[in-house]
């Protein structure tokens, strides 16, 4: 099993050390960077080259929201999992649509954190029960909103099927097999949709699709 390089940013040293210690039994996870604020994290990114970042939101100097946006822009191959005390759907929506690949509460146990790290590496996103509840609520709110021809979101059948399978947590390779197309075509469809809807990553695309009822 290949080693996953992980960074953690949190201004509470005891919490940082606790997370690192709790994940030590998982030998495929290696922490390569610790930071006590968003700016310190960004300063160390180039040298450490983490594949996954565990990101707190409320930090001095530069907060996790801004740091997540910058990492999504400057390090597109690095996945960000928010690890926050804020059980607030506004944070979930904003972060998932602006670069985060997953959102965990700090009460999450080590097994779930490990699962999130592994899944974002495999699929590009991790959706747990908390995030799914936010998606479901937003989907219901959207359904009660009167339609408008001015802001209608249109996708073709192939795009809709790719979105449906993404939301079922299939990887690009698995989607390609199911649709009898190449993985490159799947990635091209994803890239086209993200550009069209001004989204940063697969997690944002999944979140956007469910919120806007683009899948059955």
Image (spheres, rainbow, N blue to C red):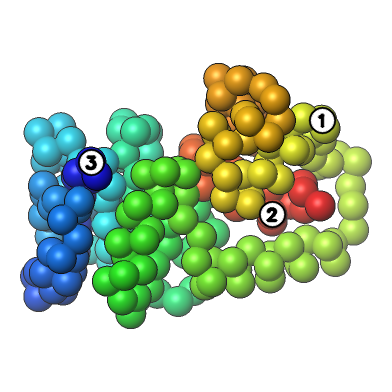
Q: Is residue 95 above or below residue 136?
A: above
The numbered mark, 3 or 1, whose residue comes first in the sequence reads 3
Left or right position of 16 against 165: left
Kindly identify which residue carries mark 3.
2
Left or right position of 203 against 30: right
Q: Is residue 107 above or below residue 123?
A: below
Q: How far apart are marks 1 and 2 (CA)?
A: 16 Å
Q: Residue at x 63, y 63 (%)?
A: 135
Quarter the N terminus occupies: top left
Q: Say whether residue 167 is visible.
A: yes
Q: Residue at x 46, y 56 (%)?
A: 126
Q: Which of 102 and 11 is in front in this view?
A: 102
Assess whether mark 2 and mark 1 are in contact (beta carbons under 8 angstroms).
Answer: no
Kindly identify which residue carries mark 2.
210
Q: How far apart are marks 2 and 3 (CA)?
A: 32 Å
Residue 156: image tag: 1
């Amino acid at each position: 099993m290949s080693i996953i390089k992980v960074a953690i940013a949190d201004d509470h040293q005891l919490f940082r050390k606790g997370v690192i210690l709790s994940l030590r039994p998982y030998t495929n996870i290696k922490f390569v960077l610790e930071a006590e604020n968003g700016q310190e994290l960004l300063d160390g990114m180039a040298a450490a080259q983490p594949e996954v970042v565990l990101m707190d939101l409320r930090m001095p100097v530069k907060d996790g929201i801004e740091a997540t946006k910058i990492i999504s822009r400057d390090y597109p191959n690095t996945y960000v999992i928010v690890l926050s005390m804020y059980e607030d759907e506004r944070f979930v929506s904003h972060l998932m649509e602006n670069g985060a690949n997953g959102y965990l509460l700090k009460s999450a146990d080590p097994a779930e954190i490990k699962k999130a790290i592994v899944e974002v590496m495999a699929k590009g996103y991790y959706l747990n029960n908390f995030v799914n509840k936010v998606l479901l609520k937003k989907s219901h709110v959207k359904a009660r909103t009167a339609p408008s021809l001015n802001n209608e979101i249109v996708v073709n059948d192939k795009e809709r099927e790719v979105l449906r399978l993404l939301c079922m947590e299939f990887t690009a390779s698995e989607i390609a097999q199911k649709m009898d197309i190449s993985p490159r075509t799947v990635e091209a469809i994803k890239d086209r949709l993200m550009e069209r809807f001004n989204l940063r990553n697969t997690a944002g695309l999944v979140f956007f699709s469910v919120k806007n009822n683009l899948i059955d």
